[in-house]
Image: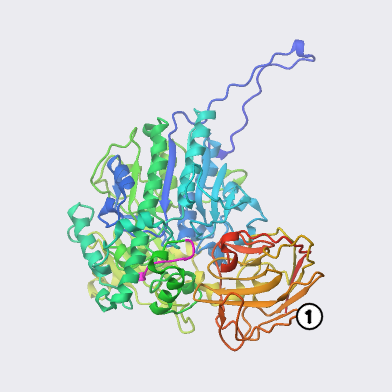
C-alpha cells in the first residue's frame, strides 16, 4: 500500500535465454509512484520578526513576499518552536522537536533523549520520503541539525545528504559571515567564493539564490518529468547582519523615531490591512529594555544605523527569494509548484543585547559600552563600517521586541507568541485560489509534513529504509486552503525552549516565561531555580490575539489553569522534554559539552576547519608545539594557524619573524612579536592558552624568548595588562569557523594579513601537537 519504503524494484524486462540470440531485451516500464505531483519549494528566513515585513504591516520592504502573498493565502496564527535547530527538525520530520532529539541547537546537545542533537532514523524527513516517490531533492543555505562531532568526519548519514537531500550547498552551523562563509557542497568543504558568478562582490545569500536557480534548471533540463523538492533556507537574517551600504542606505532616517515609535506604527498598519484583529493590543516594552528617549544622541545614531543595516539585509534577502521564485516562473512551472513560505524559524533575535559590532560578545558574557563599540568602529571607518566584512554587528534587543509587534517577547521565549509566531504564505496557483482573508487557525511547523503528504495522497510511511517509524505529531492544514473560516483541527501543542514553556489546547494557552531573558547577559543562576515553583499565566487566545490579558489570577479560571498545567506535564513526558530546562545543561556545565575524548592531537599542514567544540579540551588547557623548519624559498609573508573569526588567536610568520595575535571579539586585540624565525627548526610551546593569566610563548631555540608582557608590538597594537592578554574569550570565538593549520580560512584573525587571505604558509610545517594538561 505504499507505506513501506523503499518500494520493491520493477520486474526485469524481456526474457533471458542461454544466448543473446535466444533472449529478448526490453527496459522495464517504470511509472513514477506519483502522477502529476507538484514541485515543492519551502522558503524560511532566520531570526525575523512578525512585525518586520511590509507584506504584513512592517516597516521593511518585502516586495517579493508581497507578490507571493497576492498569489496565495496567508496564516497569522502559525508557530515555530522559538529556536532554529528545533524548528527545522520539527518541520522536516512532522514530529515534535524533543521527540526527534532536537530540544536545543546542535552545539548544546546532551545525553538526555530529547536533547541528543541527532534526528533518529525512526523519524524520516520529508525529502527522505519524497525521494522514494520520485522527487529530486536539494537544500540550499543553513543546516543546523548536523551533530558538531560529525562535521567533516562522519557519520555522514546525519548531514543533509544523509537525511534525504540529493544535493546540499550551504553552511552547517547556526550562522556564518555573508562575505567570508565556510561552505559545504554535499559533505565536502569547499573554498569561500571570491565573487558571485558574473562579477561583483560576493554575498552568501545571492550565491544561494544562484545555486538554487542553477540546480532547478539542470534538474528540469535533464529530467523534465521529475518533480523537485527545494529547501531554501538562507540563514539570513540571522546575525551577523551583513549587507552593502547600497541596501542599508535605503533606510536612512527611517528609524529615527526609535523602537517605541516603530512598534506603535507597525501595529496600526497591521490592523489597517486586516492582518491583526481590531482587539489585538500592542505589548509593553519588556523590563530591562530602555526607552528610546532615554538614549543619548550619540547612542541613538549608533542604534539607528544598526537597524538600518538590518532592514537593508532583510530587503536584500527578500529580493534573493524573489529571484528563486522568479526562476520557477521562468521555467514555466509556477502553476505546478507548491510554495510554502514560512517567514522565519523563530521570532526576532534579542541576542544583540545592547547593540554590538561583534555579536558573540553576548554569548561569551562580555559587557561593553557604546563608547567601546564606537572606539572599535572608529578604527574601522566609523558607523559606515557597520554591515561590512570586518564587523559582526547585530542590533539592540529592543529593535527585536519592536520587530515582533504586537507581541511581548523574542526568539528563545517559547512561552509567548513573540518567540514562536511567524507569518506564513501558501501559494500554488494550480490548486489554491488567492484569498486575502488571513487564516487564523492555530498551526505549527510540525504540520507542514502531514500537509504535504495529504496533498500528494501519501500515507505517512510505517517503515522507511528498514526503520519502523514514529507517529507523526502534526496535523495537516489542507482543510484551510479553500475555507478561511474552517473549524480548527489542531487541538494541542506544547512549547519548550530552555525552560521557557507552555501548552496550547483548544484556544487556550498556559505558559511560563522560564529562567532567563534572552536580552540579559550570561547564563542564569539556576542554583535556586525550581521549575515546579514557576508562576504560570493563562490566556484565552481567541479574543486575546496578542496575549495581553493574563487570566491566571481569576478564581473562575483556577481549575482550567490546573488542568492545562497537568496537560503540559503530560506532553512533556510523552515528548522527551524532561528534565525541564534540559537545553540549558551544557551552558551551565561547559565541561559536559559533547566532544572527543582525545587528550592529544597531532595535526598536519592542510588540516583545516576543525571545530572549536571538537577541540575544546585542547583549547582550554593545551601544550602546543610546532616544528617549523624554514624552507629556503620562504619569503616571510605567509603562514597562519588559529581560531578565526572576529575573535581568535593565531601564530603566524611575517617578514622573517614569528608573531602571536589574540582578538577578543573586536573589543580588544593583542599582538606580540615572538622572535626571528631561524633557518633551522623551531620548537614553540604555549602553556595553558588562551585562558591563563600567566600566558607565555616559550621559544627556546629562537634568539628571543618572549613573555607576553605589556609592550607595543611591531604592528602598533598595545598589549594591555600585566601579562599581555588582558581579556580572553571564555566560551567560543566563532559559530562557524574553525582551527586551520598553515593558512587562515574565512575571516582572518590578524589585521596584518587581511588582504592576503587565506595567507598560506610558504615554509614547512611538519606537524602540530596538542596535549591537555
Left or right relative to 514: residue 543: left
* Residue at image coords 39%, 40%: 325
Q: Which residue is outermost to the top? A: 21
Q: Position of residue 64 (x, y in %)?
A: 33, 45
* Residue at image coords 48%, 31%: 34
Q: Which residue is outermost to the right? A: 680
Left or right relative to 768: residue 474: left
Front in this rendered view, residue 537 or 697: 697
Q: Does the stretch in magenta take in 683?
A: no
From where the camera sits, is residue 421 visible?
no
Q: According to the image, label 1 marks what residue?
A: 700
- Magenta residues span 389-397
* Residue at image coords 35%, 58%: 248
From where the camera sits, is residue 588 visible?
yes
Q: How many labels does the image show?
A: 1
The picture quadrant where one finds residue 625 is: bottom right
Amino acid at each position: 500500500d505504499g507505506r513501506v519504503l523503499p518500494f520493491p524494484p520493477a520486474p526485469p524486462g524481456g526474457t533471458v535465454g542461454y544466448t543473446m540470440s535466444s533472449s529478448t531485451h526490453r527496459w522495464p516500464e517504470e511509472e513514477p509512484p506519483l502522477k502529476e505531483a507538484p514541485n515543492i519549494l519551502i522558503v524560511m528566513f532566520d531570526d525575523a520578526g512578525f512585525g518586520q515585513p511590509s507584506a504584513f504591516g512592517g516597516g521593511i520592504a518585502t516586495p517579493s513576499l508581497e507578490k507571493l502573498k497576492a498569489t496565495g493565502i496567508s496564516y497569522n496564527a502559525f508557530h515555530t518552536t522559538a529556536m532554529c535547530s528545533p524548528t527545522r527538525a520539527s518541520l522536516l520530520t512532522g514530529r515534535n522537536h524533543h521527540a526527534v532529539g532536537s530540544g536545543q541547537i546542535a552545539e548544546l546537545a546532551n545525553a538526555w533523549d530529547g536533547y541528543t542533537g541527532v534526528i533518529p532514523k525512526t523519524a524520516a524527513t520529508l525529502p527522505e520520503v519524497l525521494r522514494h516517490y520520485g522527487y529530486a531533492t536539494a537544500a540550499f543555505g543553513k543546516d543546523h541539525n548536523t551533530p558538531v562531532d560529525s562535521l567533516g568526519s562522519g557519520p555522514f548519514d546525519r548531514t543533509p545528504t544523509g537525511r534525504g537531500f540529493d544535493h546540499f550547498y550551504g553552511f552547517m552551523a547556526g550562522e556564518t559571515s555573508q562575505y567570508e562563509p565556510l561552505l559545504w557542497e554535499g559533505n565536502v568543504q569547499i573554498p569561500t567564493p571570491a565573487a558571485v558568478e558574473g562579477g561583483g562582490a560576493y554575498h552568501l545569500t545571492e550565491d544561494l539564490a544562484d545555486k538554487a536557480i542553477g540546480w532547478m534548471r539542470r534538474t528540469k533540463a535533464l529530467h523534465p518529468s521529475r518533480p523537485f523538492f527545494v529547501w531554501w533556507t538562507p540563514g539570513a537574517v540571522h546575525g551577523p547582519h551583513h549587507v552593502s551600504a547600497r541596501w542599508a542606505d535605503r533606510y536612512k532616517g527611517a528609524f529615527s523615531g526609535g523602537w517605541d515609535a516603530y512598534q506603535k506604527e507597525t501595529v496600526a498598519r497591521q490592523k489597517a490591512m486586516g492582518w491583526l484583529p481590531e482587539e489585538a493590543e500592542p505589548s509593553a516594552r519588556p523590563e530591562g529594555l530602555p526607552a528610546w528617549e532615554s538614549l543619548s544622541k550619540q547612542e541613538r545614531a549608533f542604534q539607528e544605523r544598526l537597524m538600518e543595516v538590518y532592514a537593508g539585509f532583510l530587503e536584500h534577502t527578500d529580493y534573493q527569494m524573489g529571484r528563486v521564485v522568479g526562476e520557477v516562473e521562468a521555467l514555466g512551472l509556477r502553476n505546478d509548484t507548491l510554495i510554502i513560505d514560512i517567514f522565519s524559524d523563530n521570532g526576532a533575535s534579542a541576542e544583540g543585547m545592547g547593540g554590538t559590532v561583534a555579536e558573540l560578545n553576548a554569548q561569551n558574557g562580555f559587557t561593553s559600552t557604546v563608547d567601546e563599540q564606537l572606539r572599535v568602529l572608529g578604527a574601522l571607518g566609523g558607523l559606515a563600517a557597520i554591515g561590512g566584512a570586518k564587523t559582526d554587528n547585530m542590533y539592540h534587543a529592543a529593535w527585536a521586541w519592536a520587530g515582533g509587534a504586537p507581541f511581548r517577547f523574542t526568539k528563545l521565549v517559547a512561552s509567548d507568541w513573540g518567540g514562536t509566531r511567524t507569518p506564513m504564505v501558501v501559494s500554488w496557483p494550480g490548486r489554491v485560489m488567492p484569498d486575502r482573508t488571513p487564516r487564523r487557525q492555530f498551526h505549527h511547523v510540525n504540520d507542514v509534513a502531514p500537509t504535504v503528504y495529504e496533498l500528494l495522497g501519501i500515507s505517512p510511511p510505517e517503515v522507511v529504509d528498514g526503520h519502523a517509524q514514529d507517529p507523526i505529531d502534526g496535523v495537516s492544514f489542507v482543510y484551510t486552503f479553500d475555507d478561511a473560516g474552517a473549524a480548527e483541527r489542531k487541538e494541542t501543542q506544547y512549547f519548550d525552549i530552555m525552560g521557557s514553556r507552555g501548552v496550547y489546547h483548544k484556544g487556550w494557552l498556559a505558559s511560563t516565561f522560564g529562567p532567563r531573558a534572552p536580552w540579559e547577559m550570561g547564563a542564569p543562576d539556576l542554583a535556586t531555580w525550581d521549575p515546579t515553583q514557576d508562576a504560570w499565566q493563562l490566556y484565552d487566545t481567541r479574543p486575546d490575539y496578542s496575549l495581553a490579558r493574563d487570566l491566571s489570577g481569576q478564581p473562575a479560571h483556577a481549575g482550567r489553569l490546573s488542568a492545562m498545567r497537568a496537560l503540559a506535564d503530560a506532553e512533556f513526558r510523552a515528548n522527551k522534554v524532561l528534565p525541564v530546562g534540559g537545553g540549558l545543561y551544557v551552558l551551565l556545565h561547559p565541561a559536559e559539552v559533547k566532544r572527543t575524548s582525545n587528550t592529544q592531537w597531532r595535526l598536519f599542514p592542510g588540516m583545516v576547519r576543525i571545530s572549536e567544540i571538537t577541540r575544546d579540551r585542547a583549547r582550554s588547557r593545551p601544550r602546543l608545539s610546532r616544528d617549523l623548519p624554514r624552507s629556503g624559498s620562504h619569503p616571510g609573508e605567509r603562514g597562519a594557524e588559529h581560531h578565526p573569526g572576529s575573535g581568535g588567536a593565531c601564530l603566524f610568520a611575517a617578514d622573517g619573524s614569528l608573531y602571536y595575535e589574540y582578538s577578543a571579539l573586536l573589543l580588544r586585540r593583542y599582538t606580540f612579536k615572538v622572535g626571528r624565525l631561524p633557518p633551522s627548526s623551531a620548537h614553540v610551546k604555549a602553556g595553558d592558552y588562551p585562558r591563563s593569566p600567566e600566558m607565555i610563548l616559550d621559544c627556546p631555540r629562537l634568539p628571543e624568548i618572549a613573555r607576553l608582557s605589556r609592550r607595543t608590538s611591531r604592528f602598533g597594537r598595545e598589549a594591555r595588562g600585566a601579562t599581555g592578554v588582558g581579556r580572553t574569550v571564555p566560551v567560543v570565538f566563532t559559530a562557524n569557523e574553525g582551527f586551520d593549520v598553515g593558512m587562515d580560512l574565512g575571516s582572518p584573525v590578524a589585521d596584518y594579513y587581511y588582504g592576503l587571505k587565506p595567507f598560506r604558509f610558504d615554509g614547512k610545517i611538519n606537524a602540530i601537537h596538542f596535549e591537555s594538561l
